[in-house]
Image (spheres, rainbow, N blue to C red):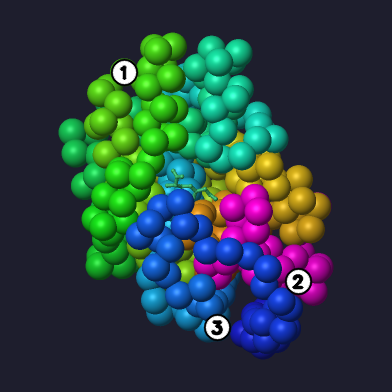
Amino acid sequence: MNYQLLLENIYNEVQSIENTGKVADYIPELAKVNPEKFGISLVDSTGNIFEVGDTKETFSIQSISKVLTTAIIFAKEGNELWKRVGFEPSGNAFNSLIQLEYEKGIPRNPFLNAGSLVIADLMLDHFDDPKKYFLNFVRTLAENPTIQSNESVAQSEMESGFRNAALVNFIKSFKNIKNAPEDVLDFYYFQCAIEMTTTDLAKCFRVFANQGLIPNTDDLFLTKSQCKRMNALMQMCGFYDQAGEFTFKVGLPGKSGVGGGVVALLPNQYTVTVWSPKLNKKGNSFYGLEVLERLTTETGTSIF
Ligand code: DON
């Protein structure tokens, strides 16, 4: 299928909708982004790339990185991982602390900040230089050796991230964090501050649409069963307390980030990414959801 015309039509149509979203400003460095940026990239199963709008500029992937770290640790630990973090939707905001106390420091899922901090702790256990490993991994998937993590964004979050500091210390009080809280946060902010284009991101997520094999090389990264489970997690937890609405309207597994990025995929068919920094009240890109709802409705493709 030639998606180019479809993406262009959706791009124009969505721009005529009033965007009531707001750029995330709780990380001061992220508040500097131009709110009007808007790009869409789609990569099909054979690697054809379709792009419209601001697809050449990099943006902060933020929570989208959580899917990649989770997949790395799932590949390493197998189902042992689920002793440290759950796989249920939380129905709460991404930075919520509320369930942690009565669930004894086991975060509901790995995409909440709490869960991702446990995954970051495991990254420190598994790799001598987790930052280097993670950056190389992302560069390999995106086939782009220039991808970097933005130090100013990471620093800005380190200075303002009192809630994440509370989360990591609280989880450590339940002994579900092994490393020093400051080291866990240092890696976590590094992974969140990685910047790439919508096309890089669509390429990174092809592995989840390709049954866990790295596209092009066909190297096994995740087993088919693990890949299914990663997609299930994205479906149930990728949009936090808006996961139901995303499933209802879009019907694809996906993940959002407060940098305004959204990625979604249809197994064996395509991966698609949108970047538009204005976020709705649940912290997900306002235009991102509009684009993807139109894409799946107009193509009649979703997993349902
Ligand atoms: O820890 C944070 O709050 C950010 N680094 C990531 C949050 C995020 O992207 C939530 N997603 N919508």
* Residue beneath disc 3: 52
**Label 2, ligand 1: CB separation under 8 Å:** no
Q: Is residue 152 in sight in this rendering?
A: yes
Quadrant location, the N terminus: bottom right
Report x, y in % for residue 23. 52, 63
- Residue range in magenta is 276-304
Report x, y in % for residue 198. 47, 70
Q: Who's the residue at 26% across and 57% down the image? A: 152
Q: Who's the residue at 65% across and 35% down the image? A: 92
What's the amino acid at mark 3?
Val
Residue 287 highlighted magenta (yes or no): yes
Measure how far apart labels 2 and 1 are at the Cα level: 44 Å
Name above or below for residue 271 compared with residue 136. below
Q: Who's the residue at 47% across and 23% down the image? A: 81
Q: Who's the residue at 79% across and 74% down the image? A: 298
Residue 197 vs residue 241, the one in the foreground: 241
Measure how far apart labels 1 and 3 are at the Cα level: 44 Å
What's the amino acid at mark 2?
Arg
- Binning the other alpha carbons within 10 Å of mark 1 as few (below 14), some (14 to 19) or many (20 upward) gives some
Disc 2 or 1, which lies upstream in sequence? 1
- Binning the other alpha carbons within 10 Å of mark 3 as few (below 14), some (14 to 19) or many (20 upward) gives many
Q: Kindly indicate whether the residue at mark 3 contacts the one at mark 1 (C-beta within 8 angstroms).
A: no
Give the side of residue 213 with respect to residue 157, left or right.
right
* Residue beneath disc 2: 294
Residue 264 vs residue 24, the one in the foreground: 24
Give the side of residue 177 with respect to residue 281, left or right.
left
Residue 76 highlighted magenta (yes or no): no
Residue 51 vs residue 110, the one in the foreground: 110
Disc 1 or 3, which lies upstream in sequence? 3
* Residue beneath disc 1: 178
Q: Secondary structure at mark 3?
A: strand
